[in-house]
Amino acid sequence: MAKNAFQNQNCPVSVTIRLIGGKYKALLLWHLTGRTLRFSQLHKLVPEATSKMLTQQLRELEEDGLILRTVYPVVPPHVDYSLTELGQSLFPILESMYRWGSAFMEAEGRTPDCSMAFPCPHCGEGHTVP
């Protein structure tokens, strides 16, 4: 195996991308910022994700310590998802990605239009980015 094969193994950017680089991970982290949501609520916010893919992404985020999955012993089962402190610490990165992507799209003459909006620290509702 080439000497450089594991060169990026300890690269901080590679580690960050591994944690948030899944197909829907950044969106899920964004939507969980400042609030707790159920699976069905997350699925409504990310409707392009199949239930199987959403479950997989949530499990990976949980395994990596970014989200907390709380199961309540009721019938039918009630499961809540929320960010851990580590997951919350990613918001500035996600915000920067949103702002950079918005500027890039606007430079191409496109208008950002997605389910991502800034969660208000007071009401938890999403607001568009100024």
Image (cartoon, grey):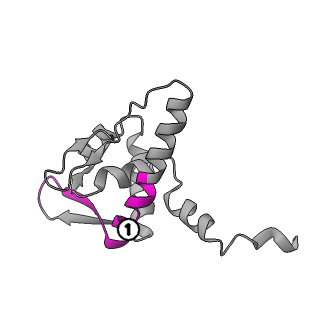
Q: Residue at x 24, y 43 (%)?
A: 126
Task: Return the residue nearer the eye: 78 or 35.
Answer: 35
**Number of residue marks:** 1
**Residue 130 vertical position relative to residue 90 in the rendered view, above or below:** above
Q: Is residue 23 visible?
A: yes
What is the magenta range?
A: 74-95
The amino acid marked with disc number 1 is Ser
Locate residue 53, reporting x and y percent. 45, 46
Q: Is residue 77 magenta?
A: yes
Locate residue 40, reporting x and y percent. 25, 44
Position of the N terminus by quadrant:
bottom right
Q: Residue at x 31, y 40 (%)?
A: 45
Q: Residue at x 43, y 54 (%)?
A: 94
Q: Residues within 10 Å of mark 1 (few under 14, many from 20)?
A: few
Locate residue 98, reporting x and y percent. 44, 46
Q: Identify the residue under disc 1.
A: 89
Q: Which structural element holds mark 1? A: loop
Locate residue 97, reporting x and y percent. 48, 50
Q: Residue at x 83, y 70 (%)?
A: 4
Position of the C terminus by quadrant:
top left
Q: Residue furthest top?
A: 109
Q: Is residue 104 left or right of residue 99?
A: right
**Residue 90 vertical position relative to residue 40 in the rendered view, above or below:** below
